[in-house]
Image (cartoon, rainbow, N blue to C red):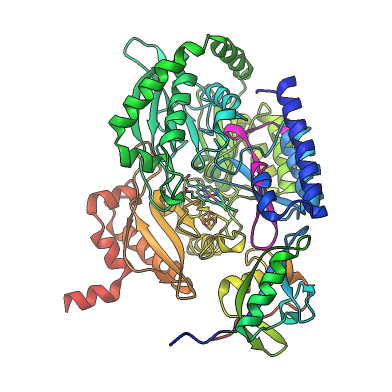
Amino acid sequence: MPRPFSPKVVTANDLIEGDVIYMARNGSWVRDMCMAWLIEDEAEANTQLARATDEPGIAVGPYLADAAAGPTGPIPTHFREAFRATGPSNRFHGKQTQQSAPEAVANV
Amino acid sequence: MYDYNNFDESFVRNRVAQFREQVGRRISGALTEDEFKPLRLMNGVYLQLHAYMLRVAIPYGSLNPNQMRQLAMIGERWDKGYGHWTTRQNIQYNWPRLSDIPDMLDALADVGMHAIQTSGNTIRNVTADHFAGAAADEVEDPRPTAELLRQWSTDHPEFQFLPRKFKLAVTGSKADRAVTKAHDIGIRIVKNAAGEIGYQILVGGGLGRTPVVGQVLKDFLPREDLLPYVEAVVSVYNTLGRRDNKYKARIKITTMENGIEAIHDLVEARFAQLRPLFSGVDQEHFANIAADFKAPEFKTASLDGYHAARDADPIFRSWSDTNVDDHRADGYGIVTISMKAHGATPGDASADQMRVLADLAEEFGHGDIRISHEQNVIFPHVHRSDLPAIFAALRAHGMATANAGLISDIIACPGMDYCALATARSIPVAQEIAERFDALKIEHDIGHLQIKISGCINACGHHHLGHIGILGLDRAGVENYQITLGGDAGPDTVIGKRAGPGFAYDQIVPAIERLVHAYLELREDEGETFIDAYRRLGEAPFKAALYPEEDKTNAA
Ligand code: HEM
Ligand code: SF4
């Protein structure tokens, strides 16, 4: 039996800042994971990834990352994505210095 | 110290101008990431987890105070006010904006520095013993040799697209603080029976997923044969090295697959072709370089103040015992400035700290600063009478931790806090180990013990060579830490052995603590270090300490 598709976000790094970015539902790029588009459908995820890959000038190295629905938007399901969504753990730098960084990693 | 000549200067400036255009084309959309990536890597620009990273070469780890001040300025102006010293004597900036990097490179060029060949499949920054020119046990200062190799390898047209990265290290002393046996080519300056100085050439060392200790390729190479010989080795590798599989592409694998004898024969044949092409100009040039590295004028001064300070202040005494090594000149010492304050990120230095270091080196250190592969800063030439003043200034800026060579003097790679290749974090593990043993107040009792941590199999943190090595892995979506025991970065270079199953993030520090307590119980006396005890007793008692449950089950 094929494994069921787990929800994804399209994520990449910003061309100039290098900061982690996510694709929002309207196709624009946002800095904040909870504003990302949690894509539940595999074909849609692949379409959006292809679109991101084709769009030069903003997103570097787009890929699909597993995510889950959290209280205020998508949250990461793997610790790597949790670090990307918050910033380094040894210094208070990166996204965690802005207010709305996700606090929890989904327990799945 | 070596200063750039006109050729170096214009080469570096042209390269910055070229890269500025490339960045412009990338930002305008004229270049795709696939097209741009090899160009940025040639200039030391990576894309990490949260931002770009700029890796700047510090050739053989040597800096002058102005360069240090410029590194501080760059960190403050274009980064987040700090930089990170690495095991390959580079500095990495973790937060630059792509559009600022050309300006950063221009600022580096202003002080004779660059980021060329700090990435990619080229000959990387040539590293050397950080005690060069100061060590009491030195045959010769390795820096002129390293500088000659740097000039030869920079922009060498034949070696810009090697099968894989290629690393050279040079040492001039038996103690081998440059870990030459873990490099693609290791160069040891030696004296033969006739008293002539030449080179022992090691080949095929490397860490990464397949750690290999380098082997002797040539026991004694006359000085004037160095460049043609090294060129022969790289050229043989360039044709033989595997480009089909990047995990088999390093020269360590080429050497294993073909055998050292075959490599030796091919190198000798290639050397015979190349030797006549080197007319001796390189040797005249070497003599000029060597003149740039002449020792400073050592002073003489009374040591009374130094001894009085030692008697009066136990903290100073402890620091000067732990962090000051013997120097070849009377009254002098080599100072290791710890970049490992308990709980700090190993190898990070703030812009303020860098400026303090620059000022101190200028005032007390003959203007000479080194970065060690252990991620510390070294003042190679300090008269002991100046140690109390240096210590006071370091202390005021969080750089006076007396832990050189001790359990909290940990090498840690950036790991999952920064690195896109990481499978787990390494920095917080280092921070917690340091804080734990500081709280226990047993660090000095434990004595010499090297812990080295990597956040993935690439082994940038030298974990294979730690007396205790820690490798962070991703096991089913959680961080898991594997321990290796018995590694050693000394002249013999020993790869550690895996102790057994890994530990969860919250179990790794307790595991290290059990290990260290076992050592304290097992050692013959205070003079027996961890690694000596391990060698005497073997792994069994240490494994028993790491896996107490298993031990009980087996005994039952
Ligand atoms: C963006 C960050 C980094 C990346 C992408 C990176 C990548 C790698 C890779 C892929 C290898 C394995 C090479 C191989 O086995 O063929 C490696 C090895 C190594 N790196 Fe890094 N590295 C990074 C940061 C660092 C840092 C911060 C240091 C110093 C603290 C470092 C020093 C080394 C050393 C000493 C080795 C092992 C020696 C060897 O086998 O050549 N690297 N690195
Ligand atoms: S060992 Fe792995 S995690 Fe650490 S810096 Fe190297 S590539 Fe990154």
At which x and y percent is residue B479? 48, 71
At which x and y percent is residue B46? 65, 52
Q: Quadrant of residue B258?
A: top left
Magenta stretch contains residue B456: no
The residue under the point 44% across, 48% down is B244
Where's the N terminus of chain B, which quadrant? top right
At which x and y percent is residue B518? 32, 62
Q: Decide if residue B514 is on the left or right side of residue B328.
A: left
Span of residues in magenta: B41-65
Q: Decide if residue B306 is on the left or right side of residue B240.
A: right
Q: Nearer the viewer, residue B517 or B238?
A: B238
The residue under the point 36% across, 44% down is B212
Where's the C terminus of chain B, which quadrant? bottom left
Q: Nearer the viewer, residue B144 or B106?
A: B106
At which x and y percent is residue A20? 71, 67
Examine the rendering and report whether any part of residue B484 can be seen.
yes
- Relative to B552, say whether B190 is above or below: above
Q: Name, please, the residue furthest toward the bottom.
A: A71
Q: Quadrant of residue B152?
A: top right
Q: Quadrant of residue B44?
A: top right
The residue under the point 45% across, 67% down is B509
Q: Nearer the viewer, residue B131 or B456?
A: B456
Q: Decide if residue B529 is on the left or right side of residue B250.
A: left
- Relative to B455, say whether B77 is above or below: above
How many numbered dots are placed on residues in this image?
A: 0
The residue under the point 56% across, 76% down is A78
Q: Nearer the viewer, residue B270 or B467?
A: B270
Magenta stretch contains residue B56: yes
Examine the rendering and report whether any part of residue B66 can be seen.
no
